Image (spheres, helix red, strand yellow):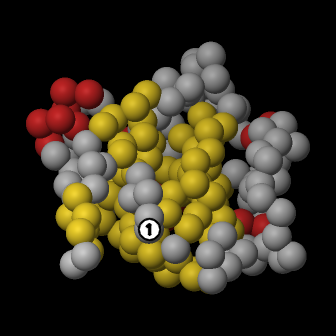
Amino acid sequence: MKIEKCNIDGLYIIKPTIFGDDRGYFCETYKKDLFEKEIGPIQWVQENQSKSTKGVLRGLHFQKGDKSQAKLVSVVKGRVFDVAVDLRKESPTFGKYFTIELTEDNLFQLFIPRGFAHGFLVLSEDAIFQYKVDNEYSPRDEGSLKWNDKTVNINWPEMDKYHLSEKDLLAPELGDYAF
């Protein structure tokens, strides 16, 4: 397993070593001692999974204050375009974003620390997305950032149609928040 820093402080790509043969493959997806050495200690409290079809865009979501969440995200099946937006007001990269394609073939994971909005777009016919969080979900501390915010200006892959929830369609833009 290899852990690489991204161009935004706090984000890390975790690339597993995959051992494959004619029966399939094996890889480690989490190793506490290596994770803590490279990224730092963390206590995962919940693991979630979602299934979505092509063109589904989920996000950009975040939790505020004491309920903010670090995430370790990955794809079990399919392909997604994954996005993390830095919402840490004191950060030199505030409002900047990072993208990565997570797939069932590369088995990459993205570690997203607290203080980021997160979302993804399904590129394959369907996808199963999995993520660990270090804090339980709190509906009253939930926030959303508009997926096509003009200030952040994410370069999303083109789709015939994007499928978003009403909540995500009505999400505020970055300038509407007082972080």
* Crowd tier of the residue under label 1, counting other residues whose Cα lies within 10 Å: few below 14, some 14–19, many 20 or above: some
Determine the residue positioned at 29% across, 30% down. 39
Element assignment for label 1? loop
Query: For residue 93, which quarter of the picture?
Result: top right
Work out whether 97 lies above or below 31. above
Mark 1 residue type: Glu
Let me know if residue 18 appears in the view.
Answer: yes
Q: Residue furthest front?
A: 22
Q: Which one is nearer the viewer's eye here, 145 or 36?
A: 36
Query: For residue 14, which quarter of the picture?
Result: top left
Work out whether 90 lies above or below 105. above
- Residue 107: percent from left, percent from top: 39, 58
Residue 110 horizontal side relative to residue 52, left or right: left
Determine the residue positioned at 54% across, 41% down. 116
Q: Which one is nearer the viewer's eye here, 60 or 39?
A: 39
- Residue 114: percent from left, percent from top: 43, 39
Work out whether 16 lies above or below 6. below
Residue 112 horizontal side relative to residue 44, left or right: right
- Residue 105: percent from left, percent from top: 44, 64
Q: Residue furthest left?
A: 33
- Residue 37: percent from left, percent from top: 19, 27
Q: Which one is nearer the viewer's eye here, 161 or 173?
A: 161
| Residue hosting label 1 | 104
**Quadrant of the frame with the C terminus:** top right
Residue 45 horizontal side relative to residue 120, left or right: left
Work out whether 45 lies above or below 33. below
Let me know if residue 67 appears in the view.
Answer: no
**Quadrant of the frame with the N terminus:** top left
Determine the residue positioned at 60% across, 34% down. 86
Determine the residue positioned at 58% across, 48% down. 100
